[in-house]
Image: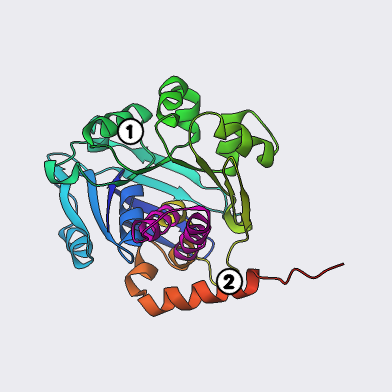
Amino acid sequence: MAVLVVGSIALDSVKTPFGEVKEVLGGSATFASYAASFFCLPHLVGVVGNDFPKEYINLLKEKPIDIKGLEIIAGETFRWKGYYDFDLNTANTVKTELNVFENFRPRIPEEYRKIKYVFLGNIDPELQLEVLKQVDKPELVIGDTMNFWITNKRKALGKLLKKLNVLVINDAEARQLSEEPNLIKAGKKLLSSGPGYIIIKKGEHGALLFSETSFFSLPAYPLECLYDPTGAGDSFAGGFLGYLAGVKKIGRNQFRKALVFGSVMASFSVEDFSLNRLKRLRQEEITQRYNEFVAISHFENFKL
């Protein structure tokens, strides 16, 4: 029950209509690892500067997260500053400072290389490909990307897609990558690029799961308290992969159940800034919300 998580670790400054925080723990590898830790043992690979607060190192250590793959080097940690208006589906970037992340070259520790479940967070697709060269025949590889890489590294991204089992992207990225305005057509077209499964996240409107033989549409869990969507997608991926790492056999039903668990973890993540809600989260709350999600999404197959 181990997963390898490779991605960014950042200090985020975020403002929403419901509050503001400065230089709090963020990054794709951070959120994905923390969410996955409720289901399995994540092995994190990333880089931070020597200015990275020790309290955040301790926070990761408090969970069952293996951080032997975390590099701490001279320089400043990757920083992102942004804000959201009342449309919380759209992040507005004010400033991005890559710092030590600019020259990040993931080095997978020897003891991580046989891990069979891999999440490639949103980093340069050339680096994602380098990670896959360092791991030994993984059984399930999930990859994320973004509009910047779709525009500027499409060739490398195309090579990466052929090596992914699952591609996780949001609706705008799906349209851009497939060059299809309709999400159903986009999902089907993206299947032909390599991955066996395509997950299209639609924010407050749920998620779509595509494969060659099935299609699944899941609504979002209805929330009354939503403070900060930063990290929701990576929390989704962590919950999704974390659940799958713990099942004996992966098939259609397991993928659908994983989609629900991913959505559950994302719903908790957005209820506070940074990892604050996930830090307070208890295992029984995950089970309860999963059961509630199933109940509100279920309907009988009434005959007409």
Q: Nearer the viewer, mark 2 or mark 1?
A: 2
Q: Which mark is residue 157?
A: none
State the image coordinates of residue 129 (x, y, percent, origin top left).
32, 29
State the image coordinates of residue 299 (x, y, percent, origin top left).
70, 71
Nearest to N terminus: mark 2 or mark 1: 1
Within-10-Å neighbours for mark 1: few <14, some 14–19, many 20+: many
According to the image, label 2 marks what residue? Answer: 294
Placement of the C terminus among the 4 image quadrants: bottom right
Near-viewer residue (260 or 137): 137
> Is the residue 122 above or below the residue 234 in the image?
above
- Residue type, label 2: Val
Classify residue 298 by image quadrant.
bottom right
> Is the residue 16 above or below the residue 172 in the image?
below
Placement of the N terminus among the 4 image quadrants: bottom left
- Residue type, label 1: Gln
Highlighted range, magenta: 236-265
Any magenta on residue 113?
no
According to the image, label 1 marks what residue? Answer: 128
Any magenta on residue 239?
yes
State the image coordinates of residue 234 (x, y, percent, origin top left).
41, 52
